[in-house]
Image: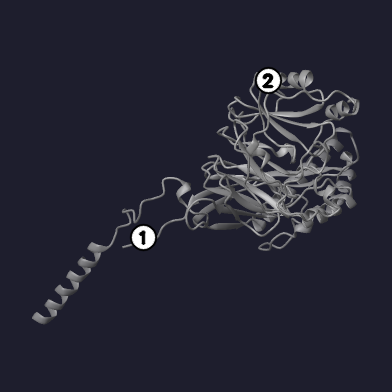
Amino acid sequence: MFQKNFTKLILIAFVFSALGCQRTIFQSPTVAPATLRDVSAIKLNFRFETDVPAPTVSPNKTAQSDERNAAVQTDFDQNRTQELLDRTIASPDRQRILAVYRRVEDLPSEFRLDMYLPDGKLLRKITPDTMAVHFADTIVWSSDSANVAFVAMVRIGGGQPNAAPASPSPTPMPATEDTANTSLSTELNAEANANAANVDANAAVLPTPVATVDEAAKNIFTFRTEQLYVCNAEGGELKAITQNEGLIYFYFVWSPDGSSLAALAETFQEWNYTKAQADAKGEIFLPAGRLRLVEKTGRERRLDDNLTTVRPVWSPDSAKVAIAFNTQVRIYDTIGDAPTQAAIPLRNQLLISSKSYDEEAQRKEESANINTNINSNAPATNSNTNTTANTNANTTINQPLGTLPDENMLVSFNPIINLEWSEDKMLYLQTGYVKEYKNEGDSRHSYLRWHRLIFSPQAIALGK
């Protein structure tokens, strides 16, 4: 009996001892992350919400302004008659004005940059004669107004007297380079083109400007394909932060903290091939690139090997960047010693939501047709005609339960075309059918719908 009771006492003591070392469900096993910045991409939970209102974009006082500066325009009109001002870009703090212009002898797709004060005083000429700025509509200030990022390469047009290309490699470019130099959009507006047509080629030589290009800038490497460059708010410290000759960088966006750029790039050969395909179809060329993270220091990391036309977006805390491939969203860490990435496939969710969207659109159309028939005193048989005309749309309703809808039967099922990261925990995505043709009347923008992902950290298992 004594041995039996002793055994029970030992067992009870062991149980209490174990419970004493066990955390209760009311105790936190670790320090919970204060923000999603502390949560790696691979440890994010998400909730998908379909067909939500478009993200509200409130006027941002810290955004750069493309409104033309009148004082800078006056300086060009009075003192720089042999140069055509394409646009001015004000820094977010409105203390600096970037002038984007070209000389009359320059190619239409090749630009130059100068830095101005808001009162129209030339502060500094940024780009040397050997450098041509491309894709002027993608030039962007960092949100803190400290730096400007743009794409440039060696100048192949006129306007570089007594200067030779500063390319690090002497190998000439293929004869098809002109196609790679085409802007992502029309680089000159109609007014600038009209001014160029009226300029007398024999006019007087441009007077020497007040500011000149820094000697250091004259020694900046220029490459044979479009690379990323940055300069500071004074127009100085010009440098290339990418040096991958053979790659073309075209879309890029600053991180909110101004430390890095998320950029798309593709090879020179890919660029020419896809452009030739678009030209053959009469479409506006839309390049597709691979996502890269480029720091101001020049350190670069390729984030993905897949091509996409969707522009990257940063999380507001600068800790992550997102991109989309067809119906999948991918998120990448941009900080930390062991960055991760996470793929969020949304095809099934979008198929199901598109089925509901099409059915609701069909019901509204049928209701509108019936009301129209009643109001016009049309025979009742007309409603049957309308129903018969929508037989193809009805097939989605009659599909067996438990199976995914057939995407070929859904008109509103389309890929992701746009992203907006409004706050750390909320990423908006837009789907739609978009086709842009050189003949504007043939272009199509249909079934543009917004959805969103709501992020939260994964639950952490209780530990000892």
Q: Nearer the viewer, residue 403 or 318?
A: 318
Q: Mark 1 packing: few (<14 Cα in 10 Å), some, or many (20+)?
A: few
Q: Position of residue 395 (x, y in %)?
A: 79, 57
Q: Quadrant of residue 164?
A: top right
Q: How many marks?
A: 2
Q: Position of residue 249 (x, y in %)?
A: 70, 48
**Residue at left offset 61%, top offset 54%:** 330
The amino acid type, in three-letter code, at marker 1 is: Leu
Q: Is residue 103 visible?
A: yes
Q: Position of residue 301 (x, y in %)?
A: 59, 55
Q: Position of residue 177 (x, y in %)?
A: 82, 50
Q: Does residue 266 appear left or right of residue 317 in this picture?
A: right
Q: Does residue 162 appear left or right of residue 146 in this picture?
A: right
Q: Is residue 431 visible?
A: no
Q: Does residue 379 appear left or right of residue 361 in this picture?
A: right
Q: Quadrant of residue 131?
A: top right
Element type where label 2 sits in the image: loop
Element type where label 1 sits in the image: loop
- Give the residue pinned by disc 1: 462
- Give the residue pinned by disc 2: 120
**Residue at left offset 35%, top offset 55%:** 30
